[in-house]
Amino acid sequence: MSELNLNFSIIIAVFQRENELSELLESLTIQTDKDFEVIVVDDGSPEKLQSVAEEFKLKLNLKYFYKSNSGPGKSRNFGMEKASGNYFIFLDSDTIVPNDYISIVRENLEKNYTDAYGGPDAAADDFNDLQKAISFSMTSFLTTGGIRGGKRQIGKFQPRSFNMGISKNAYEKTGGFGELRIGEDPDLSMTLWENGFETQLIQEAKVYHKRRTSLKKFAKQVYQFGAARPILNQRHPKYKKLTFWFPTLFLIYFSFCLFGFLFSFFRVGYFNFEKINLTLSSYEVMMILISPLQIYFFMIFIFSGIENKSVKIGFLSMLTTIIQHISYGYGFLKSWLFVGLIGIPPKKLFPSHFY
């Protein structure tokens, strides 16, 4: 591909988020490799973002387009139609890129070309404590296996659209993003595989991802991710994994421990283990049963506290991890039960997940 000359088109699909768009564009102005164009697709913002884009037209090779609202996937497809490059890079508007991002992507693709790639995300130093805690929960090996945080993993890598690229050839063959609003990026990744295209993780090509700024918004987001997974399994059954059940199993185990602990606290009983001549109260039995949970959250606290150099963020990471697992697990369980088991059409159960 190096002989074909990589011509990058960075596509930013955005709805509102004026300040975040400005920060992302500012980070693109200081790239060490400046050989790229920027396509800003305003996805029907009530107040057009053209004034933000205009501020950067002298600093960037930038084109601004306004269209009616259709969601990020369709907007990225629109951007690819308007782009002049032969390799498209997608960045979410709530990301900021380090100044060597483009040069890292170019160098890696020239050495090991694939028709799609993804990069990890991280928390910048100036993010608030909650954003850093959410980032840890979404990227740590202890919570997601590190699939979003740049850890090498077993099996194929599924790029995420907050930091992802695909070739023009791959877009023209697959049609780009499909009908899903939620889970549109793993859907595209698996569609690429089914059409013979390879993906890769470029571990050094990280972005700083602000994610959600409240626990309620974060819970809603990961609930939607969980609900999307059984739909994706239905669309791409070849790529089902048992690991997708982990958050749901956590939800069941956590609920059992919580209610069991409360029951044992208010109603004391005793268990006799005659073979080992041991008698334990119901409270003591529950303390043993929840010990794996205690160890797990202690590890979350320690690893996050050390990584972020903050005791407060360590505690917050325990909370965000609970919310992440429970919300995703509930979404997955609900979708699996009604879509996978009962057979309700996904579009009827989750109409907001589709265009």
Image (cartoon, rainbow, N blue to C red):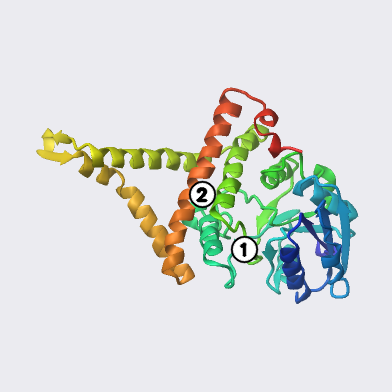
The residue at the point 60 percent across, 35 percent down is 230
Q: Is residue 170 visible?
A: no
On screen, 193 above or below 314? above
Task: Tell which circle, 1 or 2, labels the residue nearer the N-terminal end.
Answer: 1
Question: Horizontal and vertical percent for residue 185?
Answer: 69, 47
Q: Is residue 141 above or below residue 25?
A: above
- Vertical relation: 254 (above or below) 49: above
Asked if residue 58 lies left or right of residue 261, the reply is right
| Residue name at image x 31 percent, y 46 percent | 290
In the shown orientation, is residue 169 left or right of residue 343? Answer: right
Say which residue label 2 marks.
Answer: 324
Q: Quadrant of residue 116?
A: bottom right
Residue at image coords 88%, 63%: 63
Q: Residue furthest top?
A: 342
State left or right for residue 22 relative to residue 245: right
Which of the two marks, 1 or 2, is nearer to us in this view?
A: 2
Compared with residue 304, is residue 223 higher up or lower down, i.e. above or below?
A: above
Residue linked to disc 1: 203
Give the image quarter of residue 16. Answer: bottom right
Q: The residue under label 2 is which amino acid type?
A: Gln
Residue lying farthest to the left in this orientation: 277
Task: Answer few, some or many: residues within 10 Å of disc 2's Cα (few below 14, many 20 plus, some between 14 and 19).
Answer: many
- How far apart are the alpha carbons under marks 1 and 2? 24 Å
Q: Position of residue 294 (x, y in %)?
A: 33, 52
